Image (tube, grey):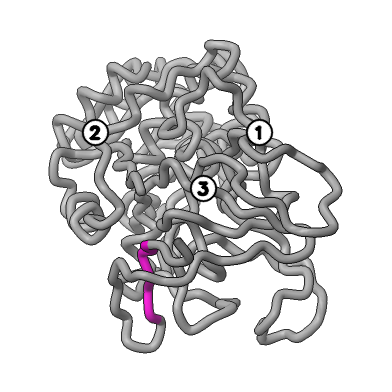
Amino acid sequence: MDTMLAGRFHLDSKKFAVEEVPIPVPGPGEVLIEVKAAGVCLSDVHLLDGSLVPLFATSDTITVGHEVSGVIHTLGPDLKRRLPVGTRVTLEAGKTCGTCAGCVRRRPCTQMLTAGIDYDGGWAEYVVVREDTLIPIPDSLPFDQAAIIPDAVSTPYAAVVATAGVRAAQSVGVWGVGGVGAHNVRLARLVGAAPIIAVDPLPSARERALAFGADVALDPAAPDFADQVRAATGGRGLDFAFDCAGVPAVRDQAASVLGLGGSLILVGITPRPLTITEGLTFNYLQKQVRGHYGGSPESVSELVQLTAAGRLDLAPSITDHIPLIEAADALHRLENKIGDPIRLILVP
């Protein structure tokens, strides 16, 4: 067999389809991965609807998917790590550019490229990856859970421990408790934040946030919303507010309930402008806004260790398993929040 199925997005026509394509061959420093599981992320939806535009695409057609796990199938030449065939791995969601063929820069650089957006990702039966993007996983970690670590879990993990640097007993608010926000709640609890306030307009999402470790779950449309936050924090306001929705109105509301020295952490992405309507009190209380994007190689490795040690159980995050051939349906379910999914998993 020399062909495979892959979920392909055509940048010129903006069309997505699962197509039969040649199985790629690993080059120097690369390996071929047999994909076992691939997560469906809201970023994939944004790619297909045009709100997320690839800046450094290496081809006119891209295989979608940046949350991937599988096993090493074939080794390319000139490898440094020598991980054996059959090694179970998850894949970092991005890589530095280096000297990618077809790159618009035509020269080495350190620009971060994202799998499934700038270069071929893992919505396929096989994917070629650079060896330095491989993270071995233990036999005890299921492929579906391992697949979501590089983004759905790694992104909020890096936001909590690195961008924000949350310490025990600091108060945290999380706006939007879907695929990323639900894990933001769990990870804030893991580092000892208290109280943790989840904010979401969906009652089912609020109930899930409580199950995931939030102390309070609030409706952002409640007329006494600010009073409820003050009551939950003993009148102090929040130390950190995480916007996991990428919505301007969320950012404005989150900033308004920060306490002295509090920080708004921008986890969710949006092309729309950031606006803070609060006036002098933003300055007087010395509030801050911090941008955040994705995870890091260190966060993926650390999360694999945490799950292997039993500190983090990702089984509740897996909403459903869907055949790769039905990828378009999975995108529809996520975009329209059918069943309020945390993570849908494509299985080749």
Q: Residues within 10 Å of mark 1 (few under 14, many from 20)?
A: some
Q: Residue at x 54, y 13 (%)?
A: 311
Of the pair 127 and 310, the residue shown nearer to us: 127
> Residue 257, percent across and down?
40, 37
Residue 51 appears in which quarter of the rendering?
Answer: bottom left
Q: Earlier in the sequence, mark 3 or mark 1?
A: 3
159 is higher (above) or lower (below) than 100: above
In this figure, which residue is indicated by the disc labeled 3? 34
Q: Residue at x 55, y 38 (%)?
A: 154
Residue 15 appears in which quarter of the rendering?
Answer: bottom left
Q: Residue at x 69, y 42 (%)?
A: 297
Q: Nearer the viewer, mark 2 or mark 1?
A: 1
Q: Residue at x 66, y 28 (%)?
A: 302
> Residue 213, percent across and down?
37, 16
In this figure, which residue is indicated by the disc labeled 2? 225
Residue 292 appears in the rendering = no
Label 3 is placed on what type of residue?
Glu
Query: Between marks 3 and 1, how big is the CA–CA gap?
Result: 14 Å
State the SS at label 3: strand
Residue 98 appears in which quarter of the rendering?
Answer: bottom right
Label 2 is placed on what type of residue?
Phe
Of the pair 21 and 54, the residue shown nearer to us: 21
Of the pair 60 and 31, the residue shown nearer to us: 31
52 is higher (above) or lower (below) than 329: below
Give the magenta-colored segment's residue range: 5-10
Is residue 9 rendered magenta in the image? Answer: yes
Label of residue 136 in the image: 1
State the SS at label 2: helix
> Residue 124, percent across and down?
42, 57
Label of residue 144 in the image: none
Query: Between marks 2 and 1, how big is the CA–CA gap?
Result: 44 Å
89 is higher (above) or lower (below) than 170: below
